[in-house]
Amino acid sequence: MLNKTNRRDFLKQGAALSTAFWVGHQIGYAAPKSPLEKINFASIGVGGKGNSDSNSAAAAGNVVAICDIDVRQLKKKAADRSFREAEQFNDFREMLDKMGDSIDAVTVSTPDHTHAAAALKAMKMGKACFCQKPLTWSIKEARMLREMAEEKQVATQMGNQGTSYTGLREAVEVIRAGGIGDVTEVHVWTNRPVWPSGISRPEDTGNAPPFVKWDLFLGPAPERPYSETYHPFKWRGWVDFGTGALGDMACHTANMPIMALNLFEPTSVELTTDETIYEGETYPNKSILKFEFPATADRGPITFFWYDGGHRPGGDIAEAIANMKVDGEGEDKYGAKPGDKDASSGCCLKGTNGYLYSPDDYGARYFLLPQDKFMDYTKPEPTLPRSPGHFEEFAAAIAGGEPAMSNFSYAGRLTETILLGNLALHAGPHNKVEWDAVNLKATNNESLDKWIMRDYAEEWKTWM
């Protein structure tokens, strides 16, 4: 453990770099200044994705505290030898209040609706913060996290690990270098949801088992009785807790095109299919959303389509993918597999000179289509740093290295953009939402205000 004076200086070295939106024209991450001792982490949420996030924290430093609303998950984690000395909590507010002086950084791996309360409290206290995707449950919360991180100058990273993949960064460079010409359309799809959606509130409710601290699970969400329908994992499909297919996967699948094209501040979004929020409770089983992005100084206007629940693009996008040449069907020179034509998750960017197609969750494997046209294509020289690993970037940022690529200045804007799609789900089919991105306002639909920012109870206003 660092003494207080040296700890303050140590963290300040990394935090001073954390607000950079983009690290450009530098290859490789600067080696962090040697810490006097290991970083002290506290992990908020240790089940599910929190299991691997807390393991990453343990590999990068000392985990001095663990927190989970489910006592079973807490005890399971505490039995691991890397966590036997960690103090255990159910309430992250209590943990931070009691152990704040001993904590340098937190991981936040809770259900979406409690991300903001946990991350804001930690950052307000000057702690570095690694938060799972999507960064927040609501659009305004994403803005708040970005602003808090920049105000407090703390190192941050969102848990969309594809950002660290070399293939994603290379694809970004190809697009930015004009590899497929001027991009006019972006199409992104996922096989989600893979959890209950389009259903009514459960009738099988009652008292929570003693190992689930239900009031802490609810956090800032409206009161409702406990049901196994919500916890664990299945909360993703419930509007009060999760962010649906968009929140689960768009921070991955849409990350590469959004990064490459700076797809922020759309002017409108519309649900173009007939599915919608079911009884105000759960996200639809499938949907198609259409975002409109205005021209910028660097590119023209772009239309962005999101598909989930089995929907996929048609027209020339589908044709370009169907006409892909794959290895095993002739000359083995394309690097494509037969299954790449039918990827259940992926994206395709349409340019004036061709297509860039990625048949995976992260945009890290990509093909320029039609392939024969691009057989002699020379990739641009790297302009983006190559990553030592996603969590490793975060740890290096704390220790005085370059800011993590998915720091909250970027991840906050990414999340704002993505969650606007859920606003369109609340607006309903074919009701275009006109969006004022600067002021976070649906200018033609005031009824959407409650979905832009949740009405928090005072006890959960951790940023006050």
Image: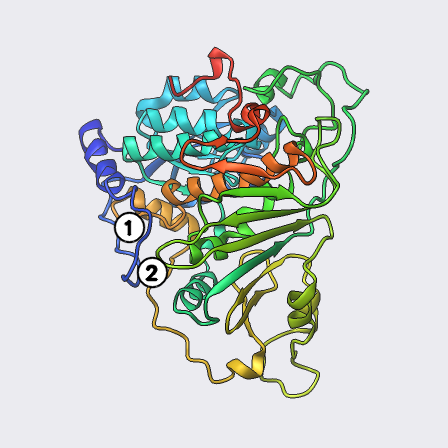
The answer to whether residue 154 is above or below residue 212 is below
In the image, residue 74 sits, relative to residue 322, either above or below, namely above
* Residue 28 left/right relative to 140: left
- Residue at (64, 32) in percent of width and height: 426
Query: Which residue corresponds to mark 1?
Result: 402
**Quarter of the figure with residue 273:** top right
Residue beneath disc 2 = 385
- Give amino acid for label 1: Glu
Relative depth, front residue between 99 and 412: 412
Q: Are marks 1 and 2 in contact (CB under 8 Å)?
A: yes
Q: Earlier in the sequence, mark 1 or mark 2?
A: 2
x and y, in percent, of residue 419 in the image: 54, 38
**Label 2 is placed on what type of residue?**
Pro
Q: Position of residue 227 (x, y in %)?
A: 74, 22
Identify the image quadrant of residue 185. bottom right
Please give the count of numbered marks on the rendered protein.
2
Q: Is residue 142 visible?
A: yes
- Residue 230 location in percent, x, y? 70, 28
